[in-house]
Image (tube, rainbow, N blue to C red):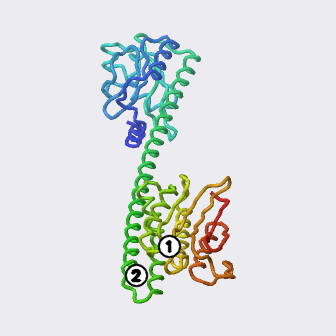
Amino acid sequence: MHRAEEFRLGALLRYGILDTPREADFDEVVNVASAVCNTPISVINLIDQGRQWFKAEVGLGVRETPLDSSICAHAILQPGLFVVPDTTLDRRFADNPLVTGDPHLRFYAGALLETPEGFPLGTVCVLDYKPRELDDTQKAFLRLMANQVMKQLELRRINAAEHVARVRAEEMVAEKETLMREGDHRLMNSLQLVQSILALQSRGASSDETKAQLDMASNRVLAIATVHKQLHLTGSLEKIEIDTFLRRLCDNLKHTAPAQITAINVSAENSKLRSDVASGLGLLVAELATNSFKYAYSPGEHGPVDVSFKTTANGWTLEVSDQGRGLPPGFDVDQSKGFGMQVVKAFVRRLNATMSVSSRPGRTAFEIFSTED
């Protein structure tokens, strides 16, 4: 046995070659080796525990034989090329049943199949029924064939390892996506619960001002919850269909709108945006729509809130408008200290966007536009 037999066998198993079907690439090696060395038998031999197994052979007609009659088991203990010119004159093989009986092997030459770590796996060998020698060209060729077989085995091992790693990586990605979706689902449920609690508190508020603040907070939470719901429904971890998202958000916002808001009309192109951008847009829509709920229409007046989104050559444009009485005279959005407008400006900055405001009786419009996707 090899001095590190356990590790040698472990190295052999890692190549995953044992008991595999015959393959043309290996069959060609033994056919050519037999022809070049002018021998009737050629074998790609691997020394397993208790047996020698042939990945390819010509002239034998079997795939394995017991280890106790193996000449190759001795060959793997020798460096480089192992040649036995006449087996009957070598005390190691003179009484070997393959020498004394069928098929009466008299000549053996085997080139070592050795791993990069130095573990011998087997040989590429040629055998004959009569004593003989190999010339230098034949010896060099046998070594070359052994090197080529070892390169093929090493390539198979690397490919198999890469396949296992790729499958594991794909499993990890799938597991991560499942965990992220589950996290998004739970977060979505938590946000909806918070939004429901705020809505309940709003309905029981003792003053209009308290109710307005609770509605505004509820709508902010609603915008975030709608983003997560859209992610969950589409199965996407990054992109959101902005038209579906805005319509769903505005349908939900309508439930918190006062009776004088007749509709929230949405006009949006069918395009996809990153979830962080969609979240910022949703918060802007919620904030500006809530602002219109409070201030756009005088008592007794009714009208819609309009939301428009479209892509441009370099980015996108969002507009939230109403048909109400307009902003107070002298209103300057840049100088406004109101909390709601501070929130709007913060979201605009977060999106690396700019905002313009136009207002007159019958139309007030907040337009946010970005040059980033």
- The structure residue drawn at horizontal position 45% and vertical position 61%, both measured from the top left corner, is 248
Q: Amino acid at mark 1?
A: His
Relative side of 314 to 46, left or right: right
**Residue 44 percent location from the top left of the image:** 43, 24
Q: Which residue is mark 2?
A: 202
Q: Is residue 270 left or right of residue 9?
A: right
- Residue for badge 1: 302
The quadrant holding residue 272 is: bottom right
Neighbor class of circle 2 (other Cα within 10 Å; few <14, some 14-19, many 20+) is many
Front residue of 52/190: it is 190
Q: Quadrant of the C terminus?
A: bottom right
Pinpoint residue 126: horizontal percent, then vertical percent.
Answer: 45, 18
> Residue 71: x percent and y percent?
39, 24
State the count of labels: 2
Q: Separation of disc 2 and disc 1 at Cα?
A: 22 Å
Q: Position of residue 289 (x, y in %)?
A: 53, 71
